[in-house]
């Protein structure tokens, strides 16, 4: 028995259906129509299409690095409650889709995140019951533009987080029964083959159950909605020297038991 094989839900281009398949996240393969195929041979769609609620400043080690880089609140201390933002529909992207640098922008930031996919409507749920509302988990790349986020947003985050293609998800959703402990998943991110991020969900300040319960206090979570749990150390602003994504860069990221995704950064083409 191959313990790496997991139940997953996928969406591919050319089909409106969600397919229940068996995947091997370690090998990057999908059991499709009776044979094993590499994930890179598919034209993927995002595995879910609901709202995406992001979480900021939710990794202890990342917060330390950002505090030194930013030197101002909210980085100086751990947040007392989850700090949320919303990624709109235009950010939605998938495995293999390019990340587009907005017009007039020199560089971007990236962040590997765990995506928590809601399976049952959640409103005022308790932490004790929160995981019963989770359908599964996926890999998310939380792309940002820091000037939009920090200098042009009036202390809110949506401008820097909400640009086109800034929310790659997938390639698939691994069902919750295949992930026994979402608070012990290693994650990583490479840029052009160089390791930039390495972390684990066990260093989250607010765990998955806490986040689901907290978000459900303010907005009803519907099946297909996603909560991203925050990113580990290695974001560009916290590095010495600071490092950013530029057109031509190739990003590969993954999470233990969930698989990996890959994107290329490309410049905006068209009228700005």
Image: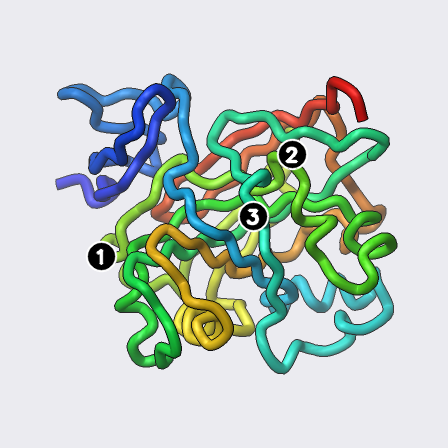
Judge whether 179 appears above or below 220 on screen: above
The earlier-in-sequence mark between 2 and 1 is 1
Neighbours of disc 3 within 10 Å: few (<14), some (14-19), many (20+): many
The answer to whether the residues at label 1 and label 3 have Cβ atoms under 8 Å apart is no
- Camera-near label (2 vs 3) is 3
Q: Which mark is residue 34?
A: none
Q: Nearer the viewer, residue 7 or 87?
A: 87
Q: Is residue 48 visible?
A: yes
Tell me where residue 260 appears, x and y as whole percent. Answer: 44, 37
Residue highlighted by disc 2: 191
Numbered badge on residue 177: 1
Marks 1 and 3, how far apart at CA: 22 Å
Return the x and y of residue 116 as percentages of the image width and height.
41, 57
- Residue found 73% across the figure and 78% down from its top: 77
Using a 10 Å C-alpha cutoff, classify the residue at mark 2 as few (fewer than 14 neighbours), some (14 to 19) or many (20 or more): some
SS at mark 3?
strand
Q: Earlier in the sequence, mark 2 or mark 3?
A: 3
Front of the two marks 2 and 1: 1
The residue shown at (50%, 25%) is 96
Q: Which residue is mark 3?
A: 112
- Tell me which corner region of the image, top left, top right, bottom left or bottom right, holds residue 86: bottom right
């Amino acid at each position: 028995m191959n313990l790496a094989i997991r139940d997953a839900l996928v969406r591919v281009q050319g089909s409106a259906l969600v397919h229940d398949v068996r995947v091997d996240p370690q090998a990057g393969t999908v059991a499709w129509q009776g044979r094993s195929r590499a994930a890179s041979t598919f034209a993927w769609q995002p595995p879910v299409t609901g709202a995406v609620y992001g979480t900021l400043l939710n990794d202890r080690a990342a917060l330390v690095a950002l505090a030194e880089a930013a030197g101002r609140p909210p980085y100086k201390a751990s947040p007392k409650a989850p700090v949320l933002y919303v990624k709109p529909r235009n950010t939605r992207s998938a495995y293999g889709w390019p990340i587009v640098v907005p017009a007039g922008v020199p560089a971007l930031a990236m962040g590997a995140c765990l995506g928590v996919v809601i399976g049952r409507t959640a409103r005022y749920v308790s932490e004790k019951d929160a995981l019963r509302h989770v359908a599964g988990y996926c890999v998310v790349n939380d792309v940002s533009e820091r000037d939009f986020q920090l200098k042009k947003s009036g202390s809110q985050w949506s401008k820097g987080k909400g640009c086109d293609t800034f929310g790659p998800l997938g390639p698939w959703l691994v069902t919750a029964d295949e992930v026994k402990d979402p608070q012990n998943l290693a994650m990583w991110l490479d840029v052009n083959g160089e390791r930039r991020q390495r972390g684990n969900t066990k260093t989250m300040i607010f765990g998955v159950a806490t986040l689901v319960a907290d978000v459900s206090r303010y907005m009803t979570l519907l099946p297909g909605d996603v909560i991203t749990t925050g990113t580990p150390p290695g974001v560009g602003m916290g590095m010495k020297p600071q490092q950013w994504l530029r057109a031509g860069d190739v990003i590969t990221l993954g999470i233990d038991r969930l698989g990996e995704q890959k994107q290329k950064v490309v410049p905006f083409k068209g009228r700005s």
